Amino acid sequence: YDTIWQAFAVLLPVRSVGVMGDGRTYDNVLALRAVTSTDGMTAQAFQFPGDFLPRVATRIINEVKGINRVTYDYTSKPPGTIEWE
């Protein structure tokens, strides 16, 4: 974690169809972002080890009401920016 320059979650302005238990859901999507950088002018997506992202996604979906999908942003800077606007 000491190598991550910035990390955050973004609640996206879209909803997603999913399944929880035996029922269909229509809930929010959460994007995760973590980057490495030395000066903020360029940045690369942080590569989490092993099964970290699937475990985190499952935990968020199971524990945060209203979230049924989790994504991870692998976009570098450039062409993207670090923050979402």
Image: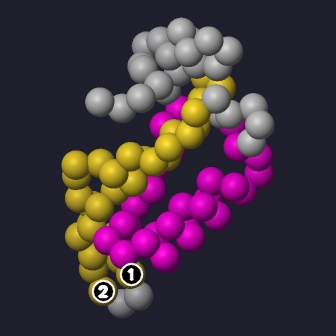
Q: Residue at x 29, y 30 (%)?
A: 85
The stretch in magenta equals: 47-74
Residue at disc 2, secondary structure: strand
Q: Indicate which disc residue 20 carries.
A: 1
Amino acid identity at mark 2: Gly
The quarter of the image holding the N terminus is top right
Q: Position of residue 30 (x, y in %)?
A: 39, 54
Say above or below: 52 vs 8: below
- CA separation in Å, label 1 and label 2: 6 Å
Dot 2 corresponds to which residue?
23
Q: Position of residue 51 (x, y in %)?
A: 72, 56
- The 10 Å Cα crowd at callout 2, few under 14, some 14 to 19, many 20 or more, is few
Give me the residue at 49% from left, 76% from top. 63
Give the residue type that dot 1 points to: Met
Q: Secondary structure at mark 1?
A: strand
In the rendering, which numbered label is found on residue 78?
Answer: none
85 or 76, nearer to the observer: 85
Q: Residues within 10 Å of mark 1 (few under 14, many from 20)?
A: few
Residue 84 lies in quadrant: top left
Depicted 85 relative to depicted 59: above or below: above
- Please state the horizontal and vertical placement of residue 10, each as a whole percent of the image: 38, 46
Residue found 53% across the figure and 21% down from its top: 76
Residue found at the far bottom of this picture? 22
Q: Nearer the viewer, residue 76 or 40?
A: 40
Q: Do the residues under discs 1 and 2 have CB atoms within 8 angstroms?
A: yes
Residue at position x 68%, y 15% in the image: 38
